[in-house]
């Protein structure tokens, strides 16, 4: 009996082992087949690269962007300019002869900064450059004049909370990196209001300043009084901090005409190349069309939006049609926290099983270094092979963690996501400031970005199977 049980047990074990073994062999064989399939795209990838980088389409995404930015200017959520921009893109995409061009209505925040100024009254008179933060309330017309407390962190503010009542809190937080430091923009006003401050000013979130304030959205909380809030320059934040450390009394007068209007009508702008074999399955390439109301939104996110358009144009020019639908989405209301994209997700999530890959380019179109990817190891192995097709321009790296406010919901729900990764060393110098202009963009870099973006989106849309998830 005992021997029988032992024999049965080992038979069982043998099967377990060989089952796993066979499965392993099967998945290895399958991966070899996928690798072969991907390498069959070498010539197509080469022709995309040639057209974008050396051929007739050279500099096209840059030139289209320059014309757009010079004609329309910046595109703040809720503004007339954004409406003009959406109409401009709708017409341009139709003229580009793409298969389907349509607008999907969404509601977006409508905040206007109005007139704004800040004056240092004590210890000496000096005007301070400011940019109100998005969503901020205004001040009374006569402004708010109050003594200043300068802190370098939330921890210091909490330590000195008794001193903050009735004052203007100035945050002189050091720039660590964007993700870390942007907390002071997002919740600086709320934290200051919790300890009784009447307004807050943050040091602009940038590693480099040529006396440039940088704006961005900020969030109030229910149950916390709303106080006006703005960004100041690194230079002024450091000066105020030095004055405070000398024990000087600092007084600032802040005037902000900011107004929050009711939500406005807007649209996500969509264009497609309809798939030849699995038209209901979709690869999304995207960037956001809205921008801040300062600068021109050429970098954030004109570049990302226009290389995404370029991907569809290049594929069409080459007479290609992927098996799956390639869908360009130009998001609206991104700067207010991905407002257009979250309404898009709610509307389309019932088709989530047909969304193969979501791609967004929203951290610049400087010299491209590769792609960032979020997905299962099996999908990553496939994407690593796809990147090898970019060997002719030597941009083959696949990094961890795709980023993009507008594609996050999909990725959190398990859809593979990819974002363009480029040399961001100068990105935050210009971000959300008057410095975000066409002068920051480079046609040669945009050509390379478009090539990377197009090869990856085309090949994934055309492969026989969707990416594993
Ligand atoms: C594209 O732009 C680069 C950089 O400005 C320039 O050298 C090149 O001549 C341009 N190519 C075309 C076809 O205009
Ligand atoms: C908070 O106060 C304590 C006691 O005065 C001090 O030791 C600590 O360094 C302070 N922390 C910050 C972040 O200012
Ligand atoms: C879902 O996909 C089907 C098939 O492509 C399409 O007809 C339908 O409009 C889609 N619905 C949404 C809400 O995306
Ligand atoms: C290719 O790019 C890598 C960095 O990703 C670099 O180290 C290498 O020198 C480049 N090779 C050529 C031939 O340019
Ligand atoms: Zn952006």
Image (cartoon, rainbow, N blue to C red):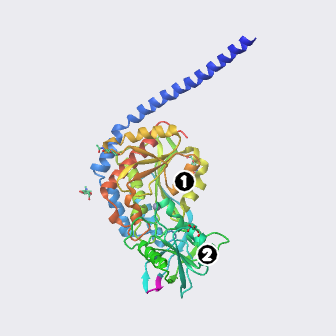
Label 1 SS: helix
Pick the residue in front: 122 or 406. 122
Considering every residue shown, the one lying at the far bottom of the view is: 142
* Residue 166 left/right relative to 98: right
Badge 1 is on which residue? 408
Numbered mark located on residue 449 in the image: none
Is ligand 5 closer than 8 angstroms to the Cβ of mark 1? no
Pick the residue in front: 14 or 48. 14
Q: Is residue 214 above or below residue 283?
A: below
* Label 2 to label 1: alpha-carbon separation: 29 Å
Numbered mark located on residue 226 in the image: 2
Quadrant for the N terminus in the image: top right
From the top left corner, tell me how far across and down residue 61 is, in percent. 35, 57
| Residue range of the region highlighted in magenta in the rendering | 118-124
Label 2 SS: loop
Pick the residue in front: 255 or 248. 248
From the top left corner, tell me how far across and down residue 382 is, in percent. 46, 38
Q: Main secondary structure of the magenta part?
A: strand
């Amino acid at each position: 009996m005992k021997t029988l049980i032992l024999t049965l047990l080992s038979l069982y074990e043998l099967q377990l082992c060989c089952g796993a073994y066979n499965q392993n062999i099967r998945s290895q064989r399958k991966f070899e087949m996928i690798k072969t399939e991907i390498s069959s795209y070498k010539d197509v990838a080469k022709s995309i690269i040639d057209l974008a980088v050396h051929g007739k389409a050279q500099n096209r995404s840059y030139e289209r962007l320059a014309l757009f930015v010079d004609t329309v200017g910046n595109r703040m959520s809720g503004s007339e300019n954004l409406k003009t921009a959406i109409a401009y893109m709708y017409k341009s995409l139709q003229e580009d002869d793409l298969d389907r061009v349509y607008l999907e209505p969404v509601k977006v925040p409508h905040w206007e900064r109005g007139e704004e100024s800040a004056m240092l009254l004590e210890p000496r008179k000096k005007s301070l450059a400011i940019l109100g933060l998005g969503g901020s309330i205004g001040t009374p017309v006569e402004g708010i004049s109050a003594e200043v407390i300068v802190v370098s962190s939330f921890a210091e503010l909490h330590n000195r909370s008794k001193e903050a009542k009735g004052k203007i809190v100035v945050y002189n937080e050091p720039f660590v990196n964007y993700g870390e430091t942007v907390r002071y923009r997002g919740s600086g006003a709320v934290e200051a209001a919790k300890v009784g401050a009447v307004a807050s000013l943050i040091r602009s979130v940038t590693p480099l300043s040529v006396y440039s304030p940088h704006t961005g959205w900020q969030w109030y909380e229910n149950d916390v009084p709303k106080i006006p809030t703005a960004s100041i320059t690194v230079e002024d934040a450091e000066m105020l901090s030095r004055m405070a450390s000398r024990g000087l009394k600092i007084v600032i007068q802040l005037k902000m005409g900011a107004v929050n209007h009711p939500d406005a009508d807007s649209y996500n702008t969509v264009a497609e190349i309809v798939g030849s074999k699995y038209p209901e399955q979709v690869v999304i390439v995207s960037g956001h069309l809205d921008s801040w109301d300062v600068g021109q939104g050429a970098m954030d996110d004109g570049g990302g939006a226009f290389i995404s358009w370029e991907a569809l144009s290049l594929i069409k020019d080459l007479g290609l049609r992927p098996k799956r639908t390639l869908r360009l989405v130009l998001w609206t209301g991104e700067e207010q926290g991905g407002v257009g994209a979250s309404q898009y997700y709610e509307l389309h999530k019932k088709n989530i099983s047909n969304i193969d890959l979501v791609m967004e380019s929203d951290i610049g179109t400087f010299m491209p270094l590769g792609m960032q990817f979020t997905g299962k190891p099996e999908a990553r192995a496939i994407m690593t092979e796809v990147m090898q097709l970019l060997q002719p321009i030597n941009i083959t790296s696949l990094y961890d963690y795709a980023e993009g406010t507008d594609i996050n919901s999909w990725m959190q729900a398990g859809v593979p996501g990819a974002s363009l990764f480029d040399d961001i060393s100068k990105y935050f110098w210009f971000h959300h400031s008057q410095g975000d202009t066409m002068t920051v963009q480079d046609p040669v870099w945009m050509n390379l970005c478009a090539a990377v973006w197009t090869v990856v989106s085309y090949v994934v849309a055309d492969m026989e199977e969707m990416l594993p998830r």
